[in-house]
Image: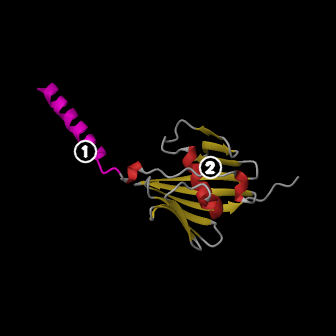
Amino acid sequence: MLRRGLILAVLAAAGLCLMACAGPRNTPSRIELPPLRLAPEALGRPLALQQQLVFELQRHRQTLDALLEVDAEAVRLAVQAMGRTGVTLHWDGMQLRQHRAEWLPQAVRGERVLDDLQFALWPAQAIRGVLPPGWTLKEEATRRQLLLDGRAWLSIERDEDASHMRLWNLLEGYRLEIHSVPLEPVTP
């Protein structure tokens, strides 16, 4: 009797999973944001920022600290949570190298982090140059949106001085708030 109930429960769960997966072909789960992978020099200037990142996914909220450096040769990013390094990224325009802590959730992917950074900071002209057909970039004074067939899937709003930005990834369902402070260059 118990075994039959277990089998029925498993079959019911499998049926629910199949029903959930059997949606229309053009659902958001079938759309992927295009990778940007812009060259570091496309930023057009060196950059060194200390950042506080507030990441929200559903009801989960995590505050992280980051150090970002960009020059003509590379993008370098280190992200920490509670004093522990979660991920380091190094992008030279050809290869993305990343080191991830075991405790970091799999949903935090270096490729997505790099694309979010470049979407937020790189010039619109550079982004438009790598978008695949159907995707467009809409930019207003303090707002930028990545659209597919007229629908926004990635959006960012920033203060006039870009020290505070709010990014919404509507496709993957997260929000990222970024507070940045420029780092002073180290002089010998």
Q: Position of residue 126 (x, y in %)?
A: 65, 59
Specify the quadrant of the image occupied by residue 100: top right
Q: Position of residue 16 (x, y in %)?
A: 24, 42
Question: Which residue is at 54% across, 35% downward?
Answer: 102
Question: Which residue is at 75% across, 53% downward?
Answer: 71
Question: Which residue is at 64% across, 43% downward?
Answer: 88
Specify the quadrant of the image occupied by residue 124: bottom right
Amino acid at circle 2? Arg
Left or right: residue 27 versus residue 127 is left
| Figure label count | 2
Identify the residue position indicated by label 2 in the image.
Answer: 37
Question: Which residue is at 69% across, 47% downward?
Answer: 76
Q: Is residue 52 among what the camera can see? A: no
- Comparing 57 with 154, the one in front is 154
Q: Position of residue 153 (x, y in %)?
A: 46, 59
Magenta highlight range = 1-25
For marks 2 and 1 on the same chain, the one whose residue lies earlier in the sequence: 1
Amino acid at circle 1? Met
What colour-coding does the image apply? Answer: secondary structure
Left or right: residue 162 versus residue 185 is left
Which secondary structure class fits the magenta region best? Answer: helix
Judging from the image, what secondary structure is the residue with disc 1 in?
A: helix
Query: Residue reaching furthest front?
Result: 133
Identify the residue position indicated by label 1 in the image.
Answer: 19
